[in-house]
Image (cartoon, coloured by chain):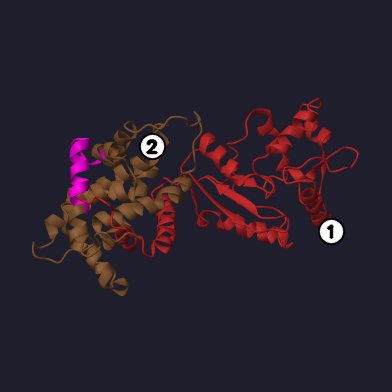
Chain colours: A brown, B red
Amino acid sequence: MAAHEDESGDATSRFHVPGRLPGMREPFEVLVRRHGATVLRVCRAVLGPHDAQDACSETFLAALRAYPGLDQGANIEAWLVTIAHRKAIDVLRSRERTVPVDSVPDGPAPERADGRDLDVWRALGELSDKQRAVVAYHYLAGLGYREVAQIVGGSEAAARRAGADGVAALRRMLGVDVGTKGVVA
Amino acid sequence: MNETWPEQITSVVEEGMAAELDRLAARLATTADTEGILDLAYCTVPSPIGELLLVASEHGIVRLAFENEDREAVLAELATKVSPRILASPERLEPAARELAEYFSGARRAFDVPVDLSLTRGFRGEVVEFLRSIEFGHTRSYAEVAGAVGNPGAVRAVGTACATNPVPLFVPCHRVVRSDGTFGAYRGGHEAKRFLLAMEAAA
């Protein structure tokens, strides 16, 4: 667990938000309520619904551990997504080690799985790990590409490209572009 | 190339999320407590004098706040002064909540749960420590308390110590009244103090 503490600590200094009162801390419960949905959303998008709960839970546990040492001006949402990203990488790596190559990618809970859900989860599963992470952090967590690049590594331009490619691939797989040209709601 | 995000992805990803978030929060508190990183746990309990906020460290009850106090401000103050590792978690407060219920139902005259007086310092700490010895149904005047802690001139300071007692009820500052018999101020409001003294006098 010490490794998590160090990792989370490293992430703290990179994102700064001006204007917070110096010396004041918010109870961690406030962070869970305010950012829980964002963290769960990105964990679900990156890992699928089955593994998301554990990853999200471990993210908040690691964040709670590191929270007293967090830089006062830190962008908390970016910090949490950074930790979630590391947890997700751990899960993806352990999948590579344990899951046979031809195995079906992680699916949704069967009772909720209708056709539309399956299509969306499959489409997300078809993206590269990097594209999936980038679209999740940009489109589902609302982080800018500069922050996304700091989390996934590489340049801002590369993150922007991965995001655009990812969205284009998703639209193609979900058939969003078919028959909708020129139709404006 | 069209880069518009397909919104159906967001709605599929968000399905059933509210319930899962509640489970996650509860699980986080339990795991954090087990791993020793839940510095402060809190919950609210109903009472005849309004909803009470209970906060406990690993050592005991560190704060009790009345309904007339700003709950967010109380928790923010604890986050700054004690630790920001604060989560809503009723488990740690169960014994305290049970003892409070017994007290208000007339079945309990003294509290056994430990209190954590780390929010008090110096003279106020001495006063708070003394207040614990005032028994159910008894009262002392501010002047008597000042004398008892060896500082007869510090009547006003005793009043301040009572008014800033972080764990009222568990440390019975409501049992300190003015020498003329009127109630004096109370963190939980005049009406709450009147209720408590009447309840104890009738028991």
Does A112 appear above or below B17?
Answer: below
Image quadrant occupied by the C terminus of chain B: bottom right
Name the residue: 54% across, 50% down: B42
Q: Residue furthest left?
A: A101
Q: Nearer the viewer, residue A179 or B55?
A: A179
- The answer for which chain carries disc 1 is B
State left or right for residue A156 relative to residue B105.
left
Does B84 appear above or below B105?
Answer: above
- What amino acid does circle 1 point to? Ala
Any part of residue B1 in sight:
yes
| Viewer-side label of 1, 2 | 2
Around disc 2, counting alpha carbons within 10 Å, would you say few (fewer than 14), some (14 to 19), or many (20 or more)?
some
Q: Is residue A34 magenta?
A: no
Q: Residue furthest front?
A: A182
Q: Nearer the viewer, residue B153 or A21?
A: A21
Disc 2, SS: loop
Please state the extent of the stretch shown in magenta in the rendering. Answer: A151-167
Decide: marks 1, 2 in contact (CB < 8 A)? Answer: no
Q: Position of residue A56 (x, y in %)?
A: 33, 53
Q: Position of residue B90 (x, y in %)?
A: 53, 56
**Among the 4 quarters of the image, the one containing residue B118:** top right
Q: Is residue A159 magenta?
A: yes
Q: What's the mark number on residue B202?
A: 1
**Secondary structure mostly taken by the magenta-highlighted segment of the chain:** helix
**Among the 4 quarters of the image, the one containing residue B69:** top right
Q: Which residue is mark 2?
A: A75
Any part of residue A90 in sight:
no
